[in-house]
Image (cartoon, grey):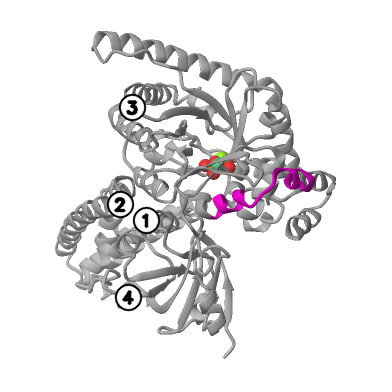
Amino acid sequence: MKEQRLSGVGVSPVSAVGTAVWYTPEPELADPPAPETVDTDTELDRFLTAKQTAKSELQDERERTAAAVGESEAEVFDAHIQFLEDPQIESGVESAVNSGCPAEHAASGTFAKFIEQFEEMSGQMAERADDLRDVRDRLIRILTNGERADLSSVPPDSVILAERLTPSDTAQLDPDRVAGFATVTGGRTSHAAIFARSLALPAVVGVGAELNTIEAESSVVVDGIAGTVINDPTTETQANVGGESVTIQADSVSTIDGRSIEVAANVGTSNDVQTATEYGADGVGLFRSEFLFLDRAEPPTEAEQYETYRSAIESFPDGRVVVRTLDVGGDKQIEYLDLPAEDNPFLGERGIRRSLGPDEDLFNTQLRALLRAARDADSGDLAVMLPLVSTVEEVTKAQSMIETVANAVETDSVDDNTGGRVETPEFGVMIETPASAFLAPELTEHIDFFSIGTNDLAQYVMAAERGNDRVKALGDYQQPAVIRAIDATVRAAEGTDTWVGMCGEMAGDPSMTELLIGIGLTELSMSAVSIPRVKTAVQTTSVSEAQALVENVREATTQDMITSLLNTE
Ligand code: PEP
Ligand code: MG
């Protein structure tokens, strides 16, 4: 039989083969009885009792997830409890019950309205619809005395196939039994994707309805690198799965001709920091600090942030941890921050614009936590980086705030005998907007480093929204205009003390390593699982050959020309 290849979004650069297990957790409801036969008080009581049971289940799952995966991943269950207790949900169910619906139908109908509202939004907000479905299904299962679908006891080497996986589902996945998973829906930033990366589990999401054609018990390959799911793979395909043997190298690496390149990790949680050390990261090139703020009811305190930053810094005693200050807005929404409704959130109040505006207090708290953590860390270095910079003033204003906070922390240190001068950390900006690339020569006078964020840079240079499949090819980092923006940034830093790194997805693509080294980048930061391959790619690169490649790429006027130059190398 011929193998069948389906494409989706690969969310973790690992692959595996296993046996298909279909997971269909959605409870089915029988038709409701006639409204006049429904006892309103009984149904309301049933709903309230189910709500209590759901809450205690969620609290248990929260604890289990915190222990097994990490505190940040566990926080999604706080968000579920919040949804569960939302007064709008309760009043919706109440009025449906009052109009003659049994509790389970009332819950189903009420949640459906909210799910629809979330689905109409874009980016991460749309993915929160999964959380609502999760809460709805839990309530309905409790109300209908349904069996709990159990993902934790599937046979070893199972490949889980599902319409979607909710956070509760993914929290149950046991990496010792589950070889990988693939889902019909879902995007790169869905919780399922984030869990897959944290657990280094092969995963492909957003495969589409064709996934349903794979039968249970079939042999399936999940290739999280290529983003493909292969049904009934040939023996040859199976033999090649995960065959690219990766060697984890704890030491830093250099090119054939001795240029040392820092290969660092992108992290968002303490658990990711741990994974980064396991994959041989030289440091952290991007700590997405907003992850500490997501999926919870209120911002983390200064003390919580201090602990997280300090332990991250100490995890790399000989390295550097670049913490990016809070980057919210765009597709990263945080309910308690009351972000404005904007027609074009990617062009609105996001990143540093919020930190110097409505979130100034949060920014100051974050800076205090960072500078105290750097002061007290037994080893390791902190660097602070600003997101979405587009003017010189943003940089000078943030810099003067950092200095003010550093002075205050230093004064406190003397008072509370924690001693020590507070060194202002290395200071850098992300190059994510065309404005910052154009201003790079002037910015070098104020900063120590640039880190190029190709995910946003490509979106803004090409005016092609990231995450919008219709303009995916246009927003590719191999577009000549994007590569020129990167080149211009590195050229602006030449001859200055500014070092230039990259923390967008392009940095984790080993087929780009030679080009990036040829352009002159000296630090590449990526998700931890990509580190071994990129370290190997660095060691097989010669700077002089890489520079010759860059000369040719500079002449290229189309993406096809660039792709073929990269492939012929
Ligand atoms: C980027 O834009 O390339 C980047 C690394 O930041 P984020 O993906 O978090 O927006
Ligand atoms: Mg970005």
Q: Would you say the beta carbon of the disc 4 residue lies within 8 angstroms of ligand 1?
A: no
Give the spatial CA distance, label 1 vs label 3: 37 Å
Specify whether 33 is left or right of 452. Answer: left
Q: Secondary structure at mark 1?
A: helix
State the image coordinates of residue 498 (x, y, percent, origin top left). 62, 25
The quadrant in which the N terminus is found is: bottom right
Q: Earlier in the sequence, mark 2 or mark 4?
A: 2
Q: Earlier in the sequence, mark 4 or mark 1?
A: 1
Q: Are marks 1 and 2 in contact (CB under 8 Å)?
A: yes
Residue type indicated by callout 1: Asp
Q: Kindly identify the amino acid type of the residue bearing the numbered disc 3.
A: Ala
Q: Which residue is mark 2?
A: 80
Q: CA distance from mark 2 to mark 3?
A: 35 Å
SS category of the residue bearing label 2:
helix
Marks 4 and 1 sit apart, C-alpha to C-alpha, by: 27 Å
SS state under label 3:
loop
Dividing the picture into quadrants, the one containing residue 470 is bottom right
* Mark 1–mark 2 distance (CA, rounded to whole Å): 7 Å
The quadrant of the picture occupied by the C terminus is: bottom right
Query: At 31% across and 23% down in the image, what residue appears?
Result: 376
Q: Please, what is the three-letter code of the amino acid marked with disc 2?
A: His
The image quadrant where one finds ligand 2 is top right
Q: Which residue is mark 4?
A: 156
Q: Which mark is residue 131?
A: 1
Can you tell which mark lies on residue 377?
3
Looking at the image, tell me whether mark 2 or mark 3 is earlier in sequence order. 2
- Work out whether mark 1 precedes mark 3 in sequence or the reverse, and give the earlier one: 1
Residue type marked 4: Pro
Asked if the magenta segment contains residue 543, the reply would be yes
